[in-house]
């Protein structure tokens, strides 16, 4: 029997509206270590986006190395396998491999080639139980970039079809070599049939479905698929054994209702014998006022006034919830944000953002996606449509949008 813990999308080093989330990440890592101990975990799988950016800060890197050192020294039999996500730098993540391998930690950042052929063997990792026996194989596939996957002649969608072919060939390769040992696939991708926080998309996906991979490539030959990329913990297409672990923290207000955690997978006698979600409650909640839609300035200010003072709170300032204010103006009020900040100065909250809509924008449903002017939440496709409409008094055609999406996709997925 072997126990595998599946986690993903840590995004270490993320700054949330300029707040440092170090304490929150550390809280998660401390919890994770306890779970590893409590469940006698043999293998920890980290399915990409370990860091938030490709050149993480020194403190984010320190937290990562400290964690790996801490768990592997406390549990010498623990094996860690991790892959690069689209946020990670593949080569940076792999660089310390010679040292990490000493700590039973294998990093797959990029796909290797031998004489121009994809080196599938490099991605097939034996997973061992505490007694040292190979119990299963992990196929650890980093986020695939152009050039990593086979070129499919005449493909409509060269990315999705190429990635699919990559997985197919890898699974075929491994099936022929694994004997009776089960296969666990780990990947960082967007699968069709999965839900995403489309309104704020901190997963950085592009509309148009270009990067969507159909999960049917994960055949019955695979016991479990450990996915990363989407921050919402979920099964894919209703399949119990194809899962996103989800992120440990909410990385945008659109993700504030997500239930976070990791997945514990037990393999026994060559097959999957149990999948359990271990729920994790983040240290700091995200709060919106009002909870739904937007409210008038007067309503918001009076609601803020009624919040008990910080002196009555047991929280330390770095545990104060992050607060989003959603206000609807009928006339300009340049002092509103100032007044909000004054009112909050002695309240146990941290103001993240003030989201403003104007009375002319009457359609409530458009509030969340269209009224946000901050650059973080603007969709490139929407910007292009607006520019196009201004210039040509018409909307771009389907072909034009498709080409635009392809360009966006290439730009977003180029490694720095
Ligand atoms: Mn990702």
Image (tube, rainbow, N blue to C red):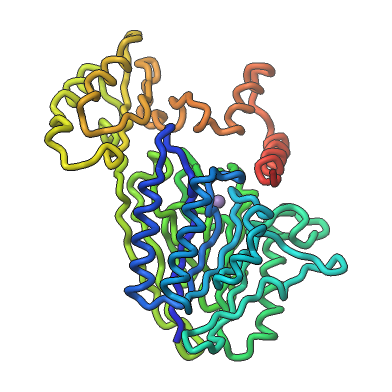
Q: Residue 170 occupies which quadrant of the picture? A: bottom right
Q: Position of residue 176 (x, y in %)?
A: 69, 85
Q: Residue drawn 46% across and 82% down? A: 2
Question: Can residue 237 be seen in the rendering of this structure?
Answer: no
Looking at this view, is 336 or 27 the one in front? Answer: 27
Q: Residue drawn 74% across and 61% down? A: 149
Give the tally of numbered discs. Answer: 0
In the picture, measured across the screen, residue 414 lies left or right of residue 246, that is: right
Q: Residue drawn 44% across and 57% down? A: 246
Instruction: Tell me: residue 45, above or below residue 373.
Output: below
Q: Quadrant of the C terminus?
A: top right
Q: Position of residue 40 (x, y in %)?
A: 38, 78
Instruction: Tell me: residue 44, above or below residue 228.
Output: below
In the picture, measured across the screen, residue 279 lies left or right of residue 165, that is: left
Looking at this view, is 149 or 165 the one in front? Answer: 149
Q: Position of residue 152 (x, y in %)?
A: 79, 60
Looking at this view, is 378 or 342 the one in front? Answer: 342
Q: Residue 327 occupies which quadrant of the picture? A: top left
Q: Residue drawn 65% across and 18% down? A: 393
Q: Quadrant of the N terminus?
A: bottom left
Q: Position of residue 311 (x, y in %)?
A: 14, 33
Instruction: Tell me: residue 254, above or below residue 124.
Output: above
Question: Can residue 302 be seen in the rendering of this structure?
Answer: yes
Name the residue furthest right.
115
Q: Residue 365 occupies which quadrant of the picture? A: top left
Instruction: Tell me: residue 210, above or below residue 395.
Output: below
In the picture, measured across the screen, residue 177 lies left or right of residue 281, that is: right
């Amino acid at each position: 029997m072997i126990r595998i813990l599946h986690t993903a999308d840590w995004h270490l080093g993320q700054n949330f509206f300029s707040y440092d989330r170090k304490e929150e990440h550390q809280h998660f890592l401390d919890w994770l270590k306890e779970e590893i101990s409590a469940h006698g975990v043999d293998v920890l799988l980290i399915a990409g986006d370990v860091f938030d950016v490709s050149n993480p800060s020194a403190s984010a890197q320190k937290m990562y190395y400290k964690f790996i050192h801490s768990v592997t020294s406390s549990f010498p039999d623990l094996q860690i396998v991790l892959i690069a996500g689209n946020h990670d730098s593949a080569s940076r993540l792999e660089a310390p491999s010679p040292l990490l391998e000493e700590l039973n930690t294998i990093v797959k950042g990029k796909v290797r080639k031998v004489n121009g052929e994809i080196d599938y063997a490099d991605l097939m990792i034996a997973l061992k139980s505490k007694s040292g026996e190979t119990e299963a194989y992990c196929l650890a596939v980093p986020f695939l970039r152009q050039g990593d996957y086979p070129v499919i002649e005449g493909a409509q969608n060269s990315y999705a079809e190429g990635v699919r072919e990559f997985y197919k060939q890898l699974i075929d390769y491994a099936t022929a070599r694994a004997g009776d040992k089960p296969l666990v696939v780990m990947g960082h991708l967007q699968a069709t049939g999965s839900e995403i926080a489309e309104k704020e998309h901190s997963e950085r996906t592009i509309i148009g479905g270009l990067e969507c991979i159909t999960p049917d490539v994960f055949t019955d030959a695979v016991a479990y698929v450990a996915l990363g990329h989407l921050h919402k913990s979920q099964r894919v297409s209703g399949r119990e054994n194809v899962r996103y672990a989800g992120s440990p923290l909410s990385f945008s207000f659109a993700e504030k209702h997500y239930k976070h955690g990791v997945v514990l997978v037990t393999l026994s006698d060559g097959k999957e014998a149990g999948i359990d979600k271990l729920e994790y409650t983040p240290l700091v909640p995200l709060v919106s006022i009002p909870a739904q839609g937007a409210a008038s300035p007067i309503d918001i200010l009076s609601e803020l006034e009624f919040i008990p003072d910080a002196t009555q709170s047991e929280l330390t300032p770095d545990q104060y919830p992050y607060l989003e204010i959603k206000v609807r103006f009928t006339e300009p009020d340049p002092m509103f944000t100032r007044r909000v900040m004054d009112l909050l100065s002695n309240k146990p909250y941290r103001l993240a953002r003030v989201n403003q809509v104007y009375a002319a924008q009457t359609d409530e449903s458009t509030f969340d996606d269209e009224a946000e002017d901050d650059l973080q939440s603007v969709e490139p496709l929407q910007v292009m449509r607006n520019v196009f409409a201004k210039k040509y008094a018409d909307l771009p055609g389907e072909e034009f949008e498709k080409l635009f999406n392809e360009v966006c996709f290439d730009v977003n997925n180029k490694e720095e």
